[in-house]
Amino acid sequence: MAYDLDNRLVIGVSTRALFDLCLENEIFEKEGVESYRKYQTEHEADILKPGPGFPLIKALLAINRLPGQKGRVEVIVMSRNSADTSLRVFRSIEHYGLDITRAVLAGGASLAPYLEAFRTDLFLSACEDDVQRAVDSGIAAGIICDGVREYAREEEIRQIRIAFDGDAVLFTDESERIFQEQGLAAFEENERRKAGSPLEEGPFARFLKTIAVLQQEFPPDQTPIRTALVTSRSAPAHERVIRTLRALNIRIDEAFFLGGISKKEILAAFGAHIFFDDQAVHTGNAAAVVPSARVPCRCRKEEKPEKGNPDVKGGIE
């Protein structure tokens, strides 16, 4: 009987999101694929250090050990590596005791076509092209940032804390575009005028709804996941957000309307294990204290994906 992915939280994660492969990626970019293959083969016995997505993945897999939740979370390694260069990654997965048994090894090809095939709810990667294509196809995805903090293997997470920006993440970028093109005054006037008109769903709305379904299976004080909205909005732009959350039937445990205050300190206080935002300035700052991922805006038909964002690097996945 085939393994059924229905009613599971399916997370796709690239090797660079899961492990620290900065040195290996540098070899790939400077010396090419053959030097990278040779290095990985020679270092197959060397265990990789945890990367920025490691704490979140480890904590999500721990949900499977809760009563009645066996197999609820499925993590799949999705990599542009070839099978030949993947043994070190699998050895490291085994070393850390991660219950990850499935993988996509695309041998340099795009991973985007396989995300829907595996019914992926969330995809974390350092490859902008794969993440952009995922978002364009309606899958929640983020470009993981290289932070300055180290992610300890011993870190035990009792409750997973996930933080989201609002505009262009949970909601569409409709209002964000007005702010970018016309300024703050026009944005606030638009939000005041449309306070009773809910925003449409953004790339992470469906993922948050999936989390909410899982949360409802636990008493409020025992839920394994806690969520937060961390937005640069403030009054009078707050009302439309609250009414949108109601209209979309989206549960948010905590909300922060910062009005331009730095998100970094708030995210540290919340204890986020991942933060999703569409602005590189926010994810770049936050990555110093919490794992962060930038969410690219969905491409419109008349637009092409951006290239060369400052928090994105090409290379191995």
Image (cartoon, rainbow, N blue to C red):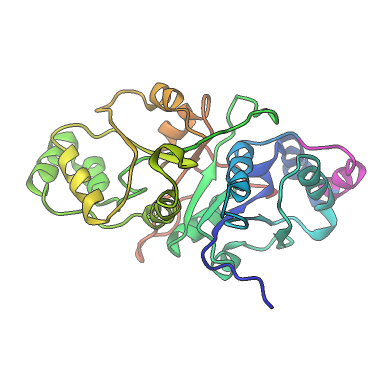
Counting every numbered tag in the picture gives 0
User: Residue at the location (74% across, 34% down)?
Assistant: 49
User: Residue at the location (52% across, 35% down)?
Assistant: 273
Q: Vertical placement of 207 versus 117: above or below?
A: above
Q: Position of residue 167 (x, y in %)?
A: 30, 45
Q: Position of residue 71 (x, y in %)?
A: 62, 58
Q: Is residue 227 left or right of residue 193?
A: right
User: Residue at the location (71% across, 53% down)?
Assistant: 100
Q: Vertical placement of 228 versus 87: above or below?
A: above
In the image, the segment drawn in magenta is 35-48
Instruction: Check if residue 39 falls in the magenta segment.
Output: yes
Looking at this view, is 186 or 243 the one in front?
A: 243
Residue 252 sits in quarter: top left
Q: Quadrant of the N terminus?
A: bottom right
In this view, the residue farthest toward the left is: 193
Q: Position of residue 131 (x, y in %)?
A: 52, 54
Looking at this view, is 50 or 173 the one in front?
A: 50
Looking at this view, is 42 or 50 the one in front?
A: 50
Q: Position of residue 195 (x, y in %)?
A: 12, 47
User: Residue at the location (34% across, 54% down)?
Assistant: 202
Q: Is residue 250 left or right of residue 285?
A: left
In this view, the residue farthest toward the right is: 42
Instruction: Check if residue 85 falls in the magenta segment.
Output: no
Residue 229 sits in quarter: top left
